[in-house]
Image: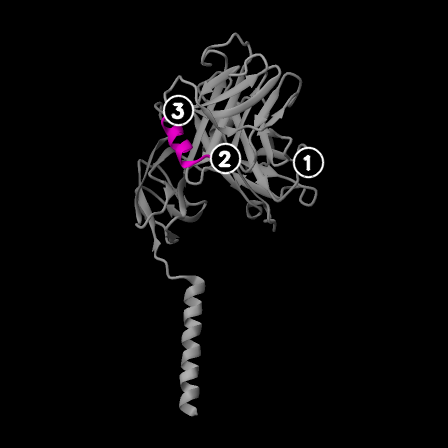
Amino acid sequence: MRNVRRILGRSAAFAAVLALVSCHGTAPTYSVSGSVAGSTGAFVVKLNGANDISMSGDGGFKFTGKLLTGDTFNVQIVDATDRCTVANGAGTVEKTDIKNVSINCILRTDPTVASLAVVRSAILSGAQEGPPVTTNASGSGGVVVIPNAVQMPIAGGITFTGLAPGAGQVNIHQSPSGNIVVPLILTADGLTAVVAPGTTLDPALLEPLRRGDLYFNVATAANPNGEIRGAIQLQGGVAASLAFLDHSVVVPPTGSTATGTGILLADQATGKLLIAYITHNVVNATAAAIHASSILGTNGASVVLFSNLQTSFAGAGNNLASPLSTARMSTQNLADFSAGLLYFEVDSQANASGDIRANIAPQ
């Protein structure tokens, strides 16, 4: 009997081990690594918005966090002194380590980059508030600024979940003062807030933006000083474009006198739209979307439908078109973005096949 108990005990222990293995799995995991070149100061490299690696100069990096086959990965950099680009830094893990992430930086005041578009994204959380706020809410977003323009147009905003802010409670602030520098406007879905049409950035704020001193903040009744916040400082890892719509590139061109501005920021790994919308003054707009063409300058099918059409947005004559907050771009859409085959379009009753349009050029 004693031997039977011993055997049964061993069998139970073995079964427990099998159950634990079944629960947690034994699937292989893979690492993400790469290198940084051209940096001129300290910086932080991030994997999927976390797993921070602080570095003081050029060199290799390897994240300690491991990923499974099928997981997405997105490597980004926070660098206050340089303009950086990330190559091979976003995608889906296959059955191998990711070893070829390449980040190249150049001093942000260098004349060769001083006139290029400034693209920064952000991830919002309660943990970034001061003091930190415990909340299930989260958000993401970003901005694009054209610094070589006379008035420096800025477009962007955030999408969020888990909270319901009121009007005037979503803004871009400057650190450390906390002053509001760019107010955002809530859209009809209550899950998106955008920069008002025609907004330009004060030239004095360009360097603070490049340094990462600006941040999104969302206040609520429960947390009037802010429930979620995110520094606008992440470089790389997003498909970004700011484009200006008119009749000239519609195929065939129309006689419309309407104009518009379209912005797109999408996560390069997951296709999630951090922020996307078109502001315009098309009369009797019937549809708006991002389209994909097989050849630049031809017509193509819509790939992201902007189903929210708002009139008199932020004043008479301003209209806004935006997608559902759950909208995403497919892997093919992201490839077409990189190839310059996407375009914004707004249709109208007068021009059902396109009233105004703009090619989406990666920035």
Residue 38, percent across and down?
31, 35
Q: Residue furthest bottom?
A: 1
- Asked which secondary structure carries label 2, the reply is strand
Would residue 234 be counted in the magenta stretch?
no
Amino acid type for the residue under numbered disc 1: Gly
Which residue is depicted at the point 65% across and 31% down? Answer: 188
The magenta stretch spans which residues? 329-341
What residue does disc 1 label? 166
- Asked which secondary structure carries label 3, the reply is loop
Q: Residue furthest right?
A: 221
Mark 1–mark 3 distance (CA, rounded to whole Å): 38 Å
What residue does disc 2 label? 273
Query: Depth-wise, is mark 1 or mark 3 nearer the camera?
Result: 3
Amino acid type for the residue under numbered disc 2: Leu
- Mark 2 surroundings: few (<14), some (14-19) or many (≥20) residues within 10 A: many
Residue 206, percent across and down?
48, 27
Residue 268: quadrant of the picture: top left
Q: Is residue 132 above or below residue 186?
A: below
- Mark 3 surroundings: few (<14), some (14-19) or many (≥20) residues within 10 A: many
Residue 293, percent across and down?
41, 23
What residue does disc 3 label? 341
> Is tag 1's residue or tag 2's residue first in the polypeptide sequence?
1
Amino acid type for the residue under numbered disc 3: Leu
Which residue is at the front of the view, 11 or 315? 11
> Is tag 3's residue or tag 2's residue first in the polypeptide sequence?
2
